[in-house]
Structure formats: structure tokens, C-alpha cells
Amino acid sequence: MVIVEQQKRVLLQGNEAIVAGALAAGCRFFAGYPITPASEISELLSVKLPELGGTFIQMEDEIASMGAVIGASLAGTKSMTATSGPGFSLMQENIGYACVAEVPCVIVNVMRGGPSTGLPTSPSQGDVQMARWGTHGDHPIIVLAVSSVSDCFSVTIKAFNLSEKYRTPVIILSDEVVAHTREAVALPDAEQIRLIDRIKPDVPPEWYTPYADNNRGVPDMAALGDGYRHHITGLIHDDRGYPTQNSQEVEKFHKRIHGKISKGFQEIMVTKAHLMEDAEIFVIAYGSVARSALKAVRDARAEGIKAGLLQLITLFPFPRKSVDTYLRQCRVVIVPEMNMGQMSREISRINQANCRIVKHNRIDGHLINPEEILRHLTTV
Amino acid sequence: MKSDERYEIRFSGSGGQGIITAAVVIADAVGSFDNRYVCQTQSYGPEARGGKSKAEVVISNSPIDYPKALGVDLLLAMTQTACDAYFFDIKPEGLLVVDSGLVPQLPTSRAVSIPFTRIAREDIGRELVANMVALGAVGYLCRQVSLESLKQALLSRVPKGTEQMNSEALQAGIEEAKKIDLDSLPRSVLSDWDDEL
């Protein structure tokens, strides 16, 4: 929520800022199917990508969209798609494929009320656990949440960087409020932005082992067409990329793809602490609700209550260390969510300090307002 | 304005009246041209065509946390239905601005009635630009935006070929608002007997 001062500011919608972030991160391929409230992302990229020599394809559905994104990324192009709940459901099978084949890509899910077609134009946070566990099998994945227009820009760049560095799908969870809120933001110049690209093999093609482990746990990635032999499959595979049922190879594979994310916990798990230094009671929030929570915390401070906010940018892997620190520091935590309590489950799971957890859930298609959170802060 | 104070404008009317466009233009003027903090949100849904339409603009000198309106300082209502639906959380010292031709029943006497649609139709020649006439009046009455910025933002946001017409509409709204004497209005939207009770 920080705006850089003294630079030329432009009025952007959250969805437009995601596009700006994706283009700044080097995304040059988008395949998708329009859906409210994510359509502006497709609409704008359909104009911008061709101008930059990139490719935009409107696919027949979201299953195919995710397939096309995986193909484009394997060919060496940073790729993304954007959708909402119903489309995100369709993408799950191929997201699993991207996890197993270790294909970098970014999936934006602008959450709307569900289940099913639900409430197309209303905000929700109902897809939090689905973003983590939507595809089957034990898989690692990174899920980031945005709460403001400037977040939409910077978090999208971070999503691409993480996906390239760890060869993994990264999911950005936005919601209808963030997507359609306009704010004036100053976007940083290209030279101020740090970009990470996947590491290509530096060995001759005949020496290349596509899934060979290294100290990062992230194999070097040749682009299809570069002349390197590269076998890609959704089956559990050995170092060469060929299917295997050998128990040692299977276990090694699983441990590596989980381990590569664990090794990066430090940089992957991002949280923002607001007024937490002396807090005795705090709120954990993410997405648009974090903005309501910040207002509530400021109002509580004005009433003399030592309140703070821990805003989660990274939802998964769950930022356990930071959450745990504050659970030990404070006596109560309020967890407001536009769902029935999907993130509060994670907090309960790690709550060894026995901090009192107060859930606040709103599922009527409206953003939680500061007053609702303030009421908890003043009464618990 | 204290640093953390908010000024909130709500534009309301019916889908197709250009309610959201008007809000986007003033948000652009405040944020990109006047360099203040601004947050613009909108109600978005089946009511996008016909039915109620709503857009909100929050203005502040410091970063804005909650993006939607909490207590409205200025409510523009371009239909009676919108006026009835969105008047409820206006601040006591807030101001109601309505299209006099479309909102016959006022919930308060602290209201400014201007025939935006008639001015657009008869003086500018297109009913379509009633939103820009209203924007001119809102921009003037709210005292939160430089009128020069408002004109520039408008030019950068309207379709090519319609700049002249839209600018004239904005100016017409500003001129109408200049005729209003705000001091002659009651200080509060609450009626006098509310205080006595």
C-alpha cells in the first residue's frame, strides 16, 4: 500500500496493474478465457501483448488455457493466465501437471462469490484452500495475495520471479474489490525492477540431464527448440524425464520438488507488519480485507487499544514463522475473512502459544468493513 | 484537511448515465494531476445496464486504507431511486446534489438541485453528457479538486472527437454550481426536529 512519491502517477485499476506488472516482469504469452471479474486482464493484454511482440490467445475454455500456458512456458516464454473461481476449477488438472513437470507460470484468480457460478460480480475469499490444494496429489505451490493497486503491480512481478526461480506455478489471489478499485500509483522504471529468469543449461546438449538435481533443487531448464533433448510428462519421472516407478527415484523426486520450495522459505514467505511492535491484540488479514483491517487497527489505536495488523502477502507456503512470532506476543488474534474461515484453520494449526483466535466471517458478497473488525478489537 | 481525513464522494444514478465515468475522471484529476491520494470503487453487477449504478471516490492527503465510502461528504443522485437508496449514510454535514428534473422528492433541504440532464440536452445538444455537467458541479462544490486538473483529466479520458462537447458540458456544470449559495442551505441533512427530539 506504499506509493512512491514525486513520480508521475497514473490512475489504474487493480486488474490493469496486474497487466502492467506482468509486462514489466517479461510476460509475453497469455492464454485465457474471459470471466468476470478478471476480464480486464485479458482485455488489456489482448492489446498490449501483440504490441510487444508477444502472443495473446483466447482459448476455448480454461482447461485449454492452462495447457497453452504450460506449452508456451516450456518453449521458453514467461506465461500467464487469469480467471475467476469457475475457470480456476477447470485449470486444476493442468496446474498439477505444471507442478510435476516443473513449469514456471503465473495464474491469477480474481475471487468472486462461489461455489459454482455463485456471485459473479461480488468479492469473496472462498478459493484460499483451493489455491493450495485444488489439484490432486501432494504438491508444492506458491500462493500470493494482493490488497491494493500497487500490490497488484509488485506482487505480480514477484510471482513471475518466484515461478522462474523455483520452476513452479505461482497463484495470485485477487478479489473483486482489489480488481476493480482504481488508485493513482507511480510505477517504478524498468531499471529499478529486479527480474529473475529461469536458469538455462550451460552444458552441451549431449550432456544435458533435464531433471538432474543440484544444490538449489531446481534443475536447469532448456527451452523446447533449443536443441536439448527434453522429455516432459505428468508421470513421476527420473532425472532424464522418463516415467519411473522405482521407489528410490519416486521418493527422491518428491523430496526434491518439496525441498526446493522449503529452501526458499526465507524469500518466498512475505508478510507486512503494521503497528505490531507493542501490539497486545492483532488482526491477521489478506487481500482487500487487509485494508479494512488496517483502518480498524488505526481506529482502535486512536481509542488507546494496542492493536496491530499482520498482513499476509504469501498465503502458501503458510508464513508460519512470522505468524508464530505474533501469536506468542499477543493475547488475541482476530481473523476476518470473506469465507467461512479458510485461513484461520492454518493459524489454529500452528497456534502452540494458545493465543485466542477470534474468527470473523462474512459470506454475503460484501467487503468486510472496518467497523466490524473494530467491534472485535474493542470488545475481546 | 488533517492528514488522515477522508473526503468521500458518491456518484449514483442509473446504468448508462455515465456515473462511473464521472467518478473515474475526478479520481484521475485528484490522483494523477493534483497528486493526492485517491481510491475509486464502483458497484458492479447486473445493474450495469439500467437499475442502480454507484461509484465512490475517496480522497485523502495520506494513503487510503479502506477503499470504500464510510460516511459520504457529497452524494450525487441522478435518479430518484438512487437518491432513495444511497442517501442513508451521508454525513450530517454532507451535501446532496441532484438532477432536479429526475429527482423530484428530496430527503433533505440541504440539497442542491440542478437540471443537469436538461442543460445537457438543451444547452449542449446531447443528453449523453449530463454526467459531465454533473461532474462540473460536483467538482466545483466539493472543493477537493483543481478545476484545471478536472478539465485535463476529462480530456484524457473521453473518446476522440467528443472533447469539445464534454468540455462544454463540464464548464456548464461549473457555471451552474457557481450560482449556488451553500451558506443559504441548512447546516445539517438532519431535519430541525431531529435535534429537538
Image: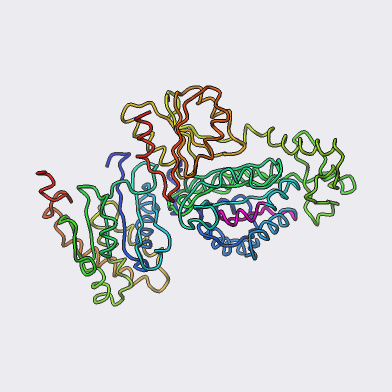
Left or right: A356 in relation to A203: left
Find residue A376 and report its image quarter. Answer: top left
What residue lies at 53% left-to-right and 35% top-to-bottom? A271
Is A320 above or below relative to A76? above
Q: Residue furthest right?
A: A206
Left/right placement of residue B84 relative to residue A278 reads left
Horizontal relation, residue A204 to residue A295: left or right:
right
Q: Is residue B183 left or right of residue B125?
A: left
Viewer-closest of B63 and A233: A233
Residue B159 x/y as whole percent:
42, 70
Vertical arrangement, residue B55 with respect to residue A248, above or below:
below
Question: Which residue is located at x 42 percent, y 24 percent?
Answer: A280
The C terminus of chain B appears in which quarter of the rendering?
top left
The image shows residue A134 at horizontal and vertical percentages of 64, 47
Image quadrant containing the N terminus of chain B: top left
User: Would residue B28 be counted in the magenta stretch?
Assistant: no
**Closer to the camera, B192 or A269?**
B192
- Span shown in magenta: A75-92
Residue drawn at point x = 80 percent, y = 57 percent:
A225
